[in-house]
Amino acid sequence: MANLRFGVVGCGRIGKLHINNLLNNIEGAEVVAAADPMLDKSGAREWLAQRGITNASTDYMDVINNPDVDVVMVCSSTDTHCEVSMEAVKAGKHVFCEKPIDYDIAKIKALLALVEEKGVKFQVGFNRRFDHNHKAVADAVKAGKIGEPHYINVSSRDPEPPPASYVAVSGGIFYDMMIHDFDMVRYLSGSEAVEISAVGSCLVNPNLQEESGIPDVDTAVVTMKMANGAIATINNSRQAVYGYDQRVEVFGS
Ligand SMILES: NC(=O)c1ccc[n+]([C@@H]2O[C@H](COP(=O)([O-])OP(=O)(O)OC[C@H]3O[C@@H](n4cnc5c(N)ncnc54)[C@H](O)[C@@H]3O)[C@@H](O)[C@H]2O)c1
């Protein structure tokens, strides 16, 4: 198979993680271009050069217009995902976009319509579907080992909260963090939510809303009823003092 050539937009925390994974763990993957407006201030230009990526720009359109790029990895801040993805799809590139695509359903639908029209591949960064522990649960459910799923419980707790500047454009805990757990509940139940309720508090950082400028919370619980009758609960914390903690339980018939 010919090598796949990637261009990475956004060289912060997750962009660097994806670049390292592409370079070290994915056979046939090449990273041929990268972009980030903060390249020269954040030290990312040197970081990229150390990995042989010298085609680095502060303008993401340079990645999109690069004829050597087959796949655009959208790893920039959340508020840029839809715009960058739109431009990449328009240019006929395949796209891997970090979650969430956008905060506005109409914009997401317009993007997905363009993806269909252009016939390109588009993947969103729901990495937990590929985590072997979560996948083992999903496989057991699919194989009917637990009967009909009655109850799904997802606990998702980060080791430490992100900086206020990240939260400000993240869309808040439900778009930014619980989105993985909503995806997991849909994946495990094979069904869509028909009822939902949520509660949240600022317990990790009581000043979160003033510091981020958005009405966010750092601790939240959601209950969902799915179309097939299954009931799900999700709990999120931005700070588990003992470290990263991800669990799923599916209780069946
Ligand atoms: N799937 C996951 O589990 C997971 C984990 C972490 C982050 N993410 C997602 O990845 C995205 C980035 O998160 P992060 O933690 O790397 O944040 P970050 O703040 O560390 O990095 C974001 C980078 O994007 C750059 N950027 C901003 N505007 C840009 C533009 N127009 N063009 C190119 N680059 C631009 C910034 O300069 C910064 O370097 C977020 O949307 C987040 O939701 C997903």
Image (cartoon, grey):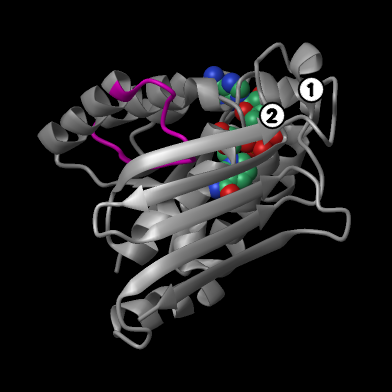
Drawn side of residue 43 relative to residue 228, left or right: right
Drawn side of residue 107 relative to residue 11, left or right: left
Q: Nearer the viewer, residue 147 or 243?
A: 147
Q: Is residue 53 visible?
A: no
Q: Which residue is painted at 85% across and 20% down in the image?
A: 207
Residue that extends furthest to the right in the rendered view of this protein: 241
Magenta span contains residue 169 = no
Give the image quarter of residue 195.
Answer: top left
Q: Which residue is mark 1?
A: 208
| Relative image position of residue 228 (x, y in whole percent) | 24, 59
Label 1 CA crowd tier, 10 Å (few <14, some 14–19, many 20+): many
| Quadrant where ligand 1 appears | top right
**Which disc number belongs to residue 241?**
none
The amino acid marked with disc number 1 is Leu
* Residues shaded magenta: 91-105
Q: Nearer the viewer, residue 187 or 22?
A: 187
- For residue 103, above or below residue 69: above
Q: Nearer the viewer, residue 83 or 230?
A: 230
| Relative image position of residue 113 (x, y in whole percent) | 17, 30
Drawn side of residue 215 relative to residue 224, left or right: right
Q: Which residue is painted at 45% across and 27% down in the image?
A: 81
Q: Nearer the viewer, residue 188 or 253?
A: 253
